Image (cartoon, grey):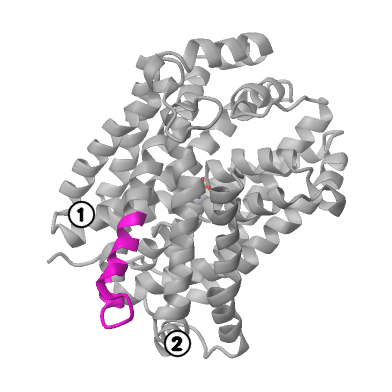
Amino acid sequence: MQQRGQWSGRLGFILAAAGSAIGLGNLWKFPYMTHHNEGGAFVLVYIGAVLLVGLPIMAAEVLLGRRARRNPVGTFLALGEGRPGGKVWGGLGFLGVSAGFIILSYYSVVAGWTLHYIVLAIQGKLASLAMDPSALSTHFSEGFLADGTQQVSYHLVFMAATVGAVYFGVKGGIERVAKVLMPLLFAILLFLVIYSATTDGFSPAMKFLFRPNFGDLTTSSILEAVGQAFFSLSLGMGAMLTYGSYMRKDSSIPRSVVEICFLDSLMGILACVIMFSIIFTFDLEVSQSATILFTTLPTVLIQLPLGSFVLTLFFVLVAFAALTSTVSLMEVVSSYAIDELGWTRQRATLTMGGVIAVFGVLSALSFGANATLSGVNLFGKESSLGVFSSLDYLAANWLLPLGGLLIALFVGWIMSPGDVREELEEGHRPLGRQFGFLRFTLRFVAPIAVGAILFSVIFLGAEYQ
Ligand code: TRP
């Protein structure tokens, strides 16, 4: 058996885990959802969801991983043994590994779009396209999305980059990538925030984001806030569990988890400040789709001083953020093959990465390049979804909440409280009341909140992204 990798220290873990959490979910999904849920009150509810559901479930995942020192399947098999349910809990790990496989296959396609924009910038074409909004939007939706060759190529290049980082293992690949990329990411984002503070739209943006109007709040926005907390924090499928399995015993879990949740929420909020300053400055009509990031935003960034530099920098930022997220998804699948199938890291990464890349081609071709794939309608919803959106729907609305619910139940009800406490206190001081709070949220608050989401999706047909 190979020696299991470890982060070099607590900082390595924090950067890798924050890298996993911070991604397209923060930079695109969160601003879009905040806009369509009318700002202020939604942001507050989101923060509440992170504190009451996200934080406890993240602590649960990390402590499970560090206790068992295995991939999600091995972890639940080992820790479920002799407890109610026994080996059946291995199925929960398998659900997570499958969700990782699915999410990575389509996430890499969108991540590939950012590479396309970087290539356009290098070729010197991005600036002129961005100066003509209709040219950019035609280029994006008709020229680029429907071009199968480009869709597949960029997706494959992004998968190759992901496999490359995971291939070199915990310390050599993932941690090294995260250590360079994460601070860079903060720097670029901060630069853009300072930029947006000089625009006229900054103060209406701050009002929109931080002055809650609870009259705007609907049941579905509460559900969306909880769902977004899951996706953004990379919870519900064992990504944080797997990263926790490489965590040293002398690193504090409670402290790390609080810091990761803080960083992830901060990045989402900073992204909102940037986007809404721009939106209010130019009085933009925000379309309800993925196009804000790829068609609206560039046309505005280019008008700023140093526009073409800012624009290029921005897409480099998004690509980096996406890479540290895809790396965490890949690591879940690889660690499963390494631990459970006994493969070497190299074989696991190349084989699994290859299979996921090929599977992802179906998503890459579902934006118009192939009529059958674009028209696939797995869930019988009113409009045809295409393979890409069907998989996103399956993962975000079903697999992650279900996984998160079961993880909370496992740690809250199945594991012995003594074991949970011991793992949390290792590398930390003895927990007082905080332990009672955490246990209460895992046993009751999180399962009820997540159960409500699943219930609403199943019985009320609610949709949240
Ligand atoms: N959290 C990442 C984002 O916000 C996406 C992601 C990475 C993810 N790993 C995950 C989502 C695991 C759910 C589960 O973009």
Give the residue displayed 59% in from the left and 65% down from the top: 53
| Residue 115 is a magenta residue | no
> Where's residue 424, x and y in %?
46, 81
Give the residue displayed 19% in from the left and 57% down from the top: 338
The quarter in which the C terminus is drawn is top right
- Sequence-wise, the earlier of marks 1 and 2 is 1
Looking at the rendering, which quadrant does residue 226 occupy?
bottom right
344 or 303: nearer the viewer: 344
| Residue 93 is a magenta residue | yes
Query: Horizontally, is 326 left or right of 136 in the view?
Result: left
Residue 442 to residue 319: above or below: below
Q: Which residues are magenta?
A: 77-96
Q: Which residue is mark 2?
A: 417
Mark 1–mark 2 distance (CA, rounded to whole Å): 30 Å
Q: Mark 1 or mark 2: which is in front? A: 2
Q: Determine if residue 241 is in view.
A: yes
Residue 373 to residue 169: above or below: above
Numbered mark located on residue 5 in the image: none
Query: Horizontally, is 37 left or right of 181 in the view?
Result: right
Q: Which residue is mark 1?
A: 337
* Secondary structure mostly seen in the magenta stretch: helix
